[in-house]
């Protein structure tokens, strides 16, 4: 109870089996004392009591001692019993009956329910303001972002992981071991001047940090390798992971093959279909792919399923999350392993005698971005930029883009408080991007923090603009980039023009584009026209 009360920062749902006694509506005499105890432990976080409440009498009894009453199964029953198409109305009637507050004409049920409280926005802003001072220094917190919003069943395992990670991070032998695999990974990755791209932009010198040359073709291997070394130290024998486009699945299956660990990859059924080549690659590497049929059958459903699977076999299994997302310690761990990108860049530019003025990376969940940007974050002379996927355009409506920082709001998804794409009811919105790897409705908490305190700027590129970036890097530098990376290429050109000649911008080339040539061929008939690119014979 102490642990849970310590975690809670919005409200506590007190499940009180004894709270109300079935149909009589009389309160358990112990309930007021229980509420006082919970409030004492939580520092007065509001308490809502639930379990078996279905009548006005019970509602009044509970709200006389608690801050709120939670009605769940009664709503389900009413929905089940209602004639088709009348469910919402039946629930509205239930609410009116129980609270005896009238629904105003035109107001939605939600507006009605919260009309006596503050609006959703003001609640969010108020809690940020008061949290700001208190939570910044907590481990796993980045300002008000981050944290560990995980079910109790996971807490012990996350604590074990945190301890294992910290011990490894502070141990030089661990880093020696990590570096001993550099030849296998293809590290250090090269850094070089993009001469023709620079001339085309007519502004800052553009430098390319070539994560596309890594083994398996992207930055994902940095994190997969780091985490599997931790898993081995913790004595785990099995690995699970989620994947969207399949890049993280391939990287994870690769390191599992290298170390002889059993590997299971969860992948949305829709992505399994779209990314058939990577599915086959994962199978060639000896891993199992589990198609996830729930929800939108894409990356976010795969993450849900991976967490679910993890909980059932915590003793033997480590979950290698693929981006800087998830509950603490994942975002910090992923940033630490991906930090190799920015750290190498810093050293390589220093060797060349060049001063870095800006760094740019594409942002999906944010792992290549945080890895590139973080090592520069303390140096205020370096500008930090992230480029998100604007899909059909930021104004094209919900579900048509994946620009979480530019178009989202603060909430909790997959165990972490950060910017997410959600509707007014807090339901996660579907996303779209030409690049499967950026197609995710959340983002790493550290990037959310940098946005909030203005340390980094976030732009977004539409599908068509990304395709322009794809074309330019291919034609001007002889490098076919991943479609994810192509967003950053487009962004880098815009930023380079503004920075002007003489300054230096480094672009994180997160991955190579072989996996995307089929997609590009498919979209060219439509998007090619928009950007004047026609490859028909
Ligand atoms: C997965 C992937 C991304 C997006 O993931 P982040 O965690 O935001 O880095 C970007 N580029 C490439 C090449 C990828 O494979």
Image: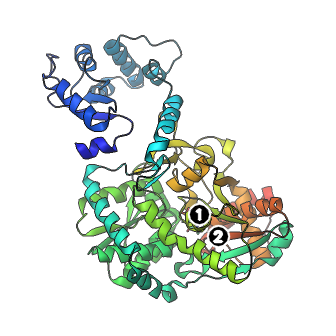
Q: Quadrant of ligand 1?
A: bottom right
Q: What separation in Å lies between label 1 and label 2 (alpha carbons)?
A: 8 Å
Image quarter of the N terminus: top left
Residue 331 in the image: above or below residue 14: below
Give percent across and percent down for residue 336. 48, 69
In the rendered image, is residue 287 in sight?
A: no
In the rendered image, the quadrant that contains the C terminus is: bottom right
Of residues 167 and 228, the one drawn nearer to the viewer in this rendering: 167
Q: Where residue 263 sits: x, y (%)?
A: 34, 73
Position above or below: 514 against 322: below
Choose top left, top right, bottom left or bottom right for residue 188: bottom right
| Left or right, 206 with reference to 300 | right
**Residue beneath the point at 34% across and 64% down:** 162
Label 1: which residue? 369
Residue at the image point whose x is 47% and y is 35% from the top: 127
Of callouts 1 and 2, which one flags the residue occurring earlier in the amino acid sequence?
Answer: 1
Q: Are marks 1 and 2 in contact (CB under 8 Å)?
A: yes
Label 1: how many Cα within 10 Å (few below 14, some 14–19, many 20+)? many
Give the answer, above or below, for where 59 lies relative to 165.
Answer: above
**Could you say whether the residue bearing mark 1 is in a helix, strand or loop?**
helix
Residue tagged by mark 2?
508
Q: Nearer the viewer, residue 505 or 171?
A: 171
Picture disc at residue 89 = none
Residue plotted at (27% across, 32% down): 39
Q: Is residue 430 visible?
A: yes
From what the image shows, is residue 175 above or below residue 455? below
Tag 2's secondary structure? Answer: strand
Question: How many residues crowd around disc 2 within 10 Å: few (fewer than 14), some, or many (20 or more)?
Answer: many
Look at 55% across and 67% down and name the residue there: 371
Q: Label 1 CB, ligand 1: below 8 Å?
A: yes
Q: Position of residue 268 (x, y in %)?
A: 44, 58
Q: Position of residue 511 (x, y in %)?
A: 60, 72
């Amino acid at each position: 109870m102490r642990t849970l009360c310590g975690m809670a920062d919005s409200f506590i749902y007190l499940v009180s089996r004894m709270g109300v006694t079935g149909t009589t509506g009389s309160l358990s005499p112990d309930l007021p004392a229980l509420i006082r105890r919970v409030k004492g432990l939580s520092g007065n976080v509001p308490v809502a009591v639930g379990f078996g409440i279905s009548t006005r009498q019970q509602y009044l009894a509970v709200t006389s001692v608690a801050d709120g009453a939670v009605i769940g199964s009664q709503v389900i029953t009413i929905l089940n019993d209602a004639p088709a198409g009348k469910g919402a109305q039946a629930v509205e009637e239930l609410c009116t009956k129980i609270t005896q507050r009238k629904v105003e004409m035109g107001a939605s049920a939600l507006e009605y329910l919260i009309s006596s409280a503050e609006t959703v926005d003001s609640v969010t802003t108020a809690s940020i303001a008061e949290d700001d001072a208190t939570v910044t220094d907590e481990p796993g917190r980045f300002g008000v972002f981050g944290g560990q919003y995980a079910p109790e069943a996971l807490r012990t395992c996350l604590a074990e992981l945190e301890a294992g990670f910290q011990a490894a991070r502070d141990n030089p032998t661990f880093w020696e071991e990590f570096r001993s695999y550099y030849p296998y990974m293809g590290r250090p990755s090269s850094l070089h001047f993009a001469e023709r791209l620079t001339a085309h932009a007519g502004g800052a010198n553009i430098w390319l940090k070539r994560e596309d040359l890594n083994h398996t073709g992207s930055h994902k291997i940095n994190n997969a390798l780091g985490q599997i070394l931790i898993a081995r130290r913790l004595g785990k024998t099995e690995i699970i992971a989620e994947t969207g486009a399949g890049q993280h699945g391939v990287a994870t299956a690769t390191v599992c093959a290298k170390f002889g660990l059993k590997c299971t990859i969860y992948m949305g059924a829709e992505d399994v279909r779209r990314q058939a080549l990577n599915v086959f690659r994962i199978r060639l590497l000896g891993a199992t792919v589990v198609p996830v049929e729930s929800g939108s059958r894409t990356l976010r459903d795969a993450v849900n399923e991976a967490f679910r699977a993890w909980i059932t076999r915590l003793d033997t299994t480590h979950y290698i999350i693929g981006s800087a997302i998830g509950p603490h310690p994942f975002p910090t761990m992923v940033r630490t392993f991906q930090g190799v990108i920015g750290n190498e860049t810093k050293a390589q530019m220093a060797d060349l005698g060049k001063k870095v003025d800006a760094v740019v990376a594409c942002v999906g969940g944010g792992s290549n971005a945080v890895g590139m940007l973080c090592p520069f974050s303390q140096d205020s002379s370096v500008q930090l930029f992230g480029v998100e996927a604007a899909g059909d355009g930021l104004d094209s409506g919900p579900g048509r883009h994946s620009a979480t920082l530019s178009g989202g709001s603060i909430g909790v998804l997959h165990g972490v408080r950060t910017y997410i794409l959600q509707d007014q009811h807090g339901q996660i919105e579907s996303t779209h991007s030409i690049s499967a790897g950026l197609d995710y409705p959340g983002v790493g908490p550290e990037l959310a923090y940098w946005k909030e305190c203005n340390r980094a700027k976030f732009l977004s590129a539409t599908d068509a603009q990304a395709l322009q970036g794809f074309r330019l890097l291919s034609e001007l530098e002889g490098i076919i980039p991943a479609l994810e990376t192509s967003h950053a290429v487009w962004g880098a050109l815009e930023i380079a023009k503004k920075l002007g000649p003489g300054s230096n911008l480094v672009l994180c080339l997160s991955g190579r584009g072989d996996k995307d040539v089929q997609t590009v061929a498919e979209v060219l008939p439509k998007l090619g026209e928009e950007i004047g690119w026609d490859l028909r014979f």
